[in-house]
Amino acid sequence: MTFASRLPGSRPARRTLVTLAALSGALLVTACSPSASGSSGSTGAGGDGKVNLTVWSWRVEDEAAYKKIFATYEQSHPNVHVDFKAFKATEYNKILATGLAGEGGPDVPQVRSYGQLQTTVASKALLPLDGKVDLSGWDDNIVASAKGKEDGKTYSVPFARQTVQMFYNQGLFDKNGLKAPTTWAEFIAANDKLQASGVTPIAVGAKDDWTLPIVHEVVAGARFGGKAFRDAVVTGKKTFTDPDWVASVKVVGDLEKYMPKNVTGVAQTDAQTLFSAEKAAMIPGGSFDLSVFQKANPAMKIGIFQVPPAPGSPSGSTATTAGWADGNFAVSAKSKHPAEATELVKWMTTKEFGQMVTDQIKQISAVPGVEPSDPLLKQMSDNYKSSGSPYLLLTDFRYGTPSGGELMGKGLQELLLGSKDAAAVSQDLETGVKTWFKPSA
């Protein structure tokens, strides 16, 4: 699963505010929907007298896990049957919009986060959950994904957190006498040694432009300043033409020599195959990619690390891990059983649900206090806790058109093609978001 299919990924995130129908074109890190012939949800009481709640999701690959999770819920709620329906990611937005607007839609839809949630909120398709679910004590960055931008109300419950980091093949590193780098000099030396041995150092699929903002966050988040820069740019104290941001964009161009040849012609799936086939030693990616790599090559020993700060980084020697909420579950305003649907979504704020998400679906739970059982997921989660920053082009710059991610993805493609330099890419980003973005107080 890629970040684009998840987008809310962040699993990315991978990968805007218009009309409700425009949801069909939204690219977020995972999507799914029912076909026209199978989209109607059953929301009445069944022949056994139980209340039937239909949950829709874009996560086809998680269908078995979710059915197991909801079977647990049914054990403690014997009056309820949960019917989980997962739909094709590329069709989900359109089908969800249709289902929420008409009859036969879900009681509990999986919805997008941050900017991509806003059109659904504006359509009055979701019930506000303030006073019904308790998200106090949750990460503010994660809670923001579930709220209406205009009214500040809570309309959903985040189901997972995503992070971005560098994956690496420990076997190839060992073979070349390398360890996970802790300084920029060690990182560059590792790239040089791997390249000299005939291995592609960093697998990147720049043909799919949605991947490039992730690459930028992984290799250069510390160079622009992580959370401190995010706070400065959303309040108008800095812009995307700031020298540190421009320098961070340049880092991506400087690393091109370690990427596959003609990288702008390489698709993300090709980059993932290079890594899984052990022909590339590293790949920037989201936590949602972990299960993909583990399934593709179970014998490969995978590690992760935060790319050390490049020279000149405002954060000094502190690396960063960018994170965001992948998506959320909400209650349809047209549900025939709003009390039962709300109770189900309320259960999704519990550690019981959160632990099953991380254990069964291999995602970092959004619920505070839940510890991943997978050691790599735990390392990702711990990195975010200790040095996390919002994935700002997703968390703060997807509330308008053109979005920050779209502008950055296109700009980095042009950088890698040699048609624009880092300053021009940064200026285009600033000019584009300024058409709709207004700094907060």
Image: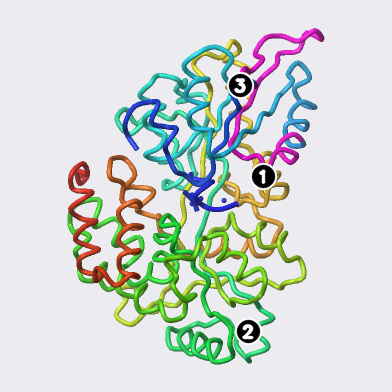
Disc 3 to disc 1, C-alpha distance:
25 Å
- According to the picture, the residue beneath numbered tag 1 turns out to be 357
Disc marking residue 383? none
Q: Position of residue 322 (x, y in %)?
A: 44, 60
Q: Residues within 10 Å of mark 1 (few under 14, many from 20)?
A: many
- According to the picture, the residue beneath numbered tag 2 turns out to be 173
Mark 3 and mark 1 lie on one chain; the one further toward the N terminus is 3
Q: Which kind of residue does numbered mark 1 sit on?
A: Val
Mark 2 and mark 3 lie on one chain; the one further toward the N terminus is 3
Q: Which segment is the magenta one?
A: 38-67
Image: 269 above or below 120: below
Disc 1 to disc 2, C-alpha distance:
31 Å
Q: Which residue is at a point 67% across and 44% down the rendered structure image?
A: 357
Q: Is residue 71 left or right of residue 438?
A: right
Q: Secondary structure at mark 3?
A: loop
State yes or no: residue 230 in magenta: no
- According to the picture, the residue beneath numbered tag 3 turns out to be 39
State yes or no: residue 54 in magenta: yes
Q: Which kind of residue does numbered mark 3 sit on?
A: Ser
